[in-house]
Amino acid sequence: MTRFANNIKTAVFLGALFAIILGIGAIFGQQGLLIAFLLGGVMNVVAYFYSDKIALASMRAQEVDEATAPDLHTMVGRLAANADLPMPRVYICPHQSPNAFATGRNPKNAAVAVTQGALRLLSYEELEGVMAHELAHVKNRDTLISCVAATIAGVINYIAWMAFWFGGSGRDGHPAAALLLVIFGPIAAGLIQMAISRSREFVADADGAAIAGSPDGLIGALRKLDSVSRGVPLENEMPTQNHMFIVEPFNGMGRSLAKLFSTHPPTEDRIAKLEALR
């Protein structure tokens, strides 16, 4: 049921995003609509097949194996077996901010990544909880819609930028509409992140605890990650990917504004639900 529901959710979400792109293009007439249609279609295909590579490249992730990171690789392999999943590719990102994410359109093409900061910060049990959480996202097929959302949100921002610089010029230009699109772009990206149900994090937390065999490691990891990441901003070249991480990367916004556009439930709520599983 989870796989079917997520497939339907993905189709509806892609359709809605495609409609937004077409709507932006339609403001600038038939030619704009055609360009938006072609760009949206191409990016939907790109998002489906290549968004995992884009996400990993933007984080400068390096693949590791049993020779280069034996403890991490063995841990992920054991947890994947617990979850009845194929062995995913394992990556380490050279960032000091502690965090982790999973990507890939399906379990056969999945990858899990963790930052250097998280490897230094977390104990073995805590890292195990984090990796189990990411594998739960893979098992629940959350990773596809996360990758697609990141890619298409970036496209919407790009179209808004292009509309501002080129759409408002000439006889048929709409400078006011173009200006509105520049404002709409970042807001749309935030709404897209919010559209990915925050409840998926609660499900991944619970399933991750089951995969790891205990919620204790993840509880400790969430406490540390939430606290330390606030003081060490993540150098992410694509902030539209923020919803992919286990804790939302700190981005310098005020707390009230950050909560308004938060892609994750409050960490204290996640911890409370995990503690109830003990």
Image: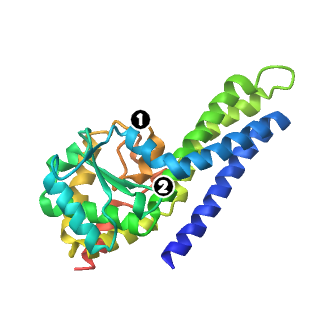
Q: In this figure, what is the number of numbered marks?
A: 2
Q: Is residue 66 above or below residue 162?
A: below
Examine the rendered structure and indicate whether residue 223 appears above or below residue 176: below
Residue at x 62% of width, y 56% of height: 14
User: SS for tag 1?
Assistant: loop
Rounded to the nearest angstrom, the CA distance separating label 1 from label 2 is 16 Å
Which residue is at the front of the view, 173 or 29?
29
Amino acid at circle 1: Glu
182 left or right, relative to 225: right
Other residues around mark 1 within 10 Å, as few (<14) / some (14–19) / many (≥20):
few
**Image point 65% across, 35% down: which residue?**
159
Q: Residue at x 52, y 55 (%)?
A: 194
To which residue does mark 1 refer? Answer: 237
Q: Report whether residue 40 is seen.
A: yes
Residue 12 is left or right of residue 173, and the answer is left
**What residue type is disc 2 on?**
Ser
Please tell me which residue is depicted at 72% across the width and 23% down the height of the picture.
166
- Residues at badges 1 and 2 in contact (C-beta under 8 Å)? no
Horizontal arrangement in the rendering, residue 101 relative to residue 195 (left or right): left
Label 2 element class: helix
Task: Give the x, y percent position of residue 69.
Answer: 16, 49
User: Which residue is more in the foreground, 90 or 157?
Assistant: 90
Which image quadrant for residue 46? top right
Q: Which mark is residue 146?
A: 2
The x, y position of residue 171, in whole percent, is 87, 21
